[in-house]
Image (cartoon, rainbow, N blue to C red):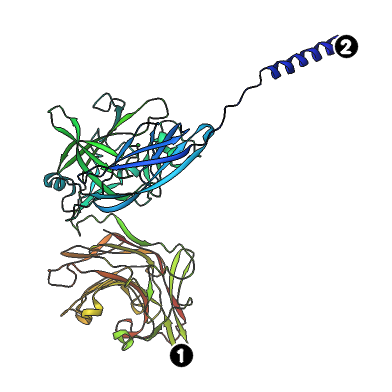
Amino acid sequence: MDSIRYLYIIALLLLISSCQDDDATLSAITVPSDLQVTAVVEAGQTGNVTITPTAADAMNFHVFFMPNSDPSVVTPGTSTTFRYTRSGQYTVPITVVAYGTGGTATTKTITVALDVRLFIDTQTLQQIAGDGTKRWVWDQTVGGHFGVGPITNDFPEFFSASANQLNECLYDDVLVFNYDQNDIYTFQLLTGAAGTSFVNWAEITRFFPNDTPAQFVDECRDISDQIATDTSFIIIDSDRLDTNGNPIKELSVANSTLSYWSGATTYDILELTSEKLSLRGIQEVPADFGGGLLAWYHTFVPETVAPVGTLPFDTLVWADEFDTAGFPDPTKWTYDIGTGTNGWGNGEAQSYTDSATNVSVVDGVLKITARAENGGYTSGRIKTQGLFDFTYGKVAVRAKLPSGGGTWPAIWMLGANITEVGWPACGEIDIMEHVGNNQDVVSSALHFPENSGADAIFKDRVLSGASTDFHIYEVSWTPDTITFSIDSVPYHTYEYTNDLPFYENNFFLLLNLAMGGNFGGTIDPLFTEATLEIDYVRVYQ
């Protein structure tokens, strides 16, 4: 044991001696000094700015031409050029960071005055922008609308998407190009309701440095706070020629992307007509999985939008699911208060309040309750007036109706111009009305000049269990017909002409529970309270 201990001590001493002999010598750390930035603005209002940085002890420079953009990296003795694509007279900050040894850095920001006037020829402008309302979407129903390949090829050798193959957060993007009389060209990237963009997996860490994306798995991410979604664009002739000897046109969007984030902000236009936009973009930074620069292929077509009022109405545009307990959402609903003129014009007996005893949301259901109080009646009436109105579509309301003699619940709509033209000139659409004195019957009605009040276009139907079960009350409203349904079964259709207030006018929604009046009838003297329950209100177009 002593000999083993002795050999161990000798080996340890030799190891320490060896380590001392191999001590590394640290390099000197130098901070770049005397940083100078020279900016040359190209003549001719082209928007080209060339930056030449110099500094003592600088290993390289990062030039930021736009805030929050990726830098252009240059070495000492070289320059870098950037093209600003927003026309007009304005100033821009340009920041240069000089890096020395050991990660040291020196920063300088200069302000450059620009006078830019870029022109897109009329034919090209009309093709890409139309009248400024043209909306480009992915040609997703056709194979090859998206692809990627090496920059040495002019086709997507590595991957070409089949029809509808990719994530919906890509397909719900819309591109809008616009312009004005001063040659100001603007671009909008409109993302879907979730606000996310489809991002190449190798680019995730550009926006989220602490994340570890899965290899080759692109992701839906919200990068709207890190790129420009409302910016400028320009189309210019490059100094490269296509196979026919014509200059290749380049489409650039400032600090943005054409839907899919691949790292490209400038794209070659492969084809541009009024019905098709095909592009090839080269990412600005080599892929970090060793693949080098890649070419990305995008094909867009104009969005096909059915005329307003065209069936089927299957896009949800507004809804209240009454998911939050308490009062109705004040961004969606407001109240009518009091007794109105002559009982709201119908001789009604109730006074409407904004009290929780009359209007409240409980367990995901809106409850409008009429009560016998102080020798009279209180109830609730809410509406979307001034907050939401629309023209044409389908309204679906899932509701359970109250019971009791004299109750008169209603789900209905009024023309938004009622304050200007009055009633019945504004028009009224009664989606559902019910009276407790005729328990198992519900009705719908249309009011307009010469057909209002007792002369309204009216129809009722028997509905057993209206006060014990939830049913869906619907109206489908087009430019020439209004159809009422219960649980998706139509029972009342009215064809109208364009001289009636239902044609091309906005309407808002109302929900209420009245008592008595010329339709509700005699109130049961033993009445104490009754409640109209509404599970949801949904509007489709």
| Disc 2 residue crowd, few under 14, some 14–19, many 20+, Cα 10 Å | few
| Disc 1 residue crowd, few under 14, some 14–19, many 20+, Cα 10 Å | few
Q: Which residue is mark 2?
A: 2
Q: Nearer the viewer, residue 147 or 19?
A: 19
Q: CA distance from mark 1 to mark 2?
A: 109 Å
Q: Nearer the viewer, residue 34 or 148?
A: 34
* Residue 187 visible, this orientation: no
Mark 1 belongs to which amino acid?
Gly
Q: How many marks?
A: 2
Question: Where is residue 509 shown, x and y percent of the image?
Answer: 31, 70
Question: Where is residue 377 shown, x and y percent of the image?
Answer: 43, 85
Q: In this rendering, is residue 440 above or below 347?
A: above
Q: Residue at x 32, y 72 (%)?
A: 386
Mark 1 vs 2: CB contact within 8 A? no
Q: Quadrant of residue 19?
A: top right
Q: Secondary structure at mark 2?
A: helix
Q: Which residue is mark 1?
A: 375
